Image (tube, rainbow, N blue to C red):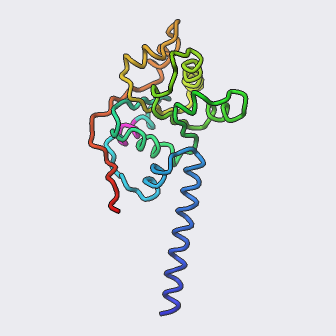
Amino acid sequence: PDYQEREREADLDRQAHAKWLARDRLLGMGIPLIHALDIIESRHPGNPVDQHVADFAASNRSVLFLAGGVGSTKTSAACRWLAPRGGRFVHVHDLAHASTFDGDWDRVKDAKHLVIDDLGCEVTSKSEWVLGKVREVIEHRTQGLLPLVVTTNLSKPNFVQRYGDEGGRLIDRLRVSAQWFDVPVYTSQRKPEAR
């Protein structure tokens, strides 16, 4: 019995260690802790948005926009897309205010796979500089056919109005390389945990 108990405890320790390594890997990509824990614990399998994300991954398109309201599982689906592939997750506020003089800016732009979360929520104060930085990343990813998933609360016309450039170059490229998916209004799958 003592031997079996020690083996059981050792197995639990190995499982806990594996979860910590997975957690650190996901956090290292920038995935928020709440979504990292959901991925590790497989808390939300079968998210209705996941099938559309899987279809995108199998397509020849390089950019996917997941548009919809709060609680529509856009971010969690984007995190589940990113987790097995590796790359970077960045909230648009952090992207918009990142320094272009350090190596991290280029690491975000050139990441193997990239998720930009909450596009349209960055505080711009009508700043063309901030909009230009966001536009630069999207254009760079589009030109290089680098996989990008963007979550946003914006409608397609609002996106075009906000990020469309004067010559229409970005919007024209996105017509060729991007998919736009209006996420239906689902009840958020995240349930408050009992205390």
Quarter of the figure that contains the C terminus: bottom left
Q: Position of residue 167 (x, y in %)?
A: 52, 6
Please give the name of the residue rendered at 55% of the width and 64% of the height, measured from the top-left corner. 18
Q: Position of residue 67 (x, y in %)?
A: 37, 29
Q: Is residue 113 left or right of residue 54?
A: right
Please give the name of the residue rendered at 39% of the width and 37% of the height, measured from the top-left corner. 55
Q: Position of residue 171 (x, y in %)?
A: 47, 15
Q: Position of residue 84 (x, y in %)?
A: 52, 48
**Is residue 100 within the magenta segment?**
no
| Residue closest to the eye, 123 or 114 | 123
When the figure is inspected, residue 84 is found, relative to residue 140, above or below; the finding is: below
Magenta part, dominant SS: helix
Quarter of the image for residue 105 reads top right
When the figure is inspected, residue 17 is found, relative to residue 105, above or below; the finding is: below
Q: Residue furthest bottom?
A: 1
When the figure is inspected, residue 174 is found, relative to residue 1, above or below; the finding is: above
Q: Which residues are magenta?
A: 50-55
Q: Is residue 145 left or right of residue 44?
A: right
When the figure is inspected, residue 152 is found, relative to residue 193, above or below; the finding is: above
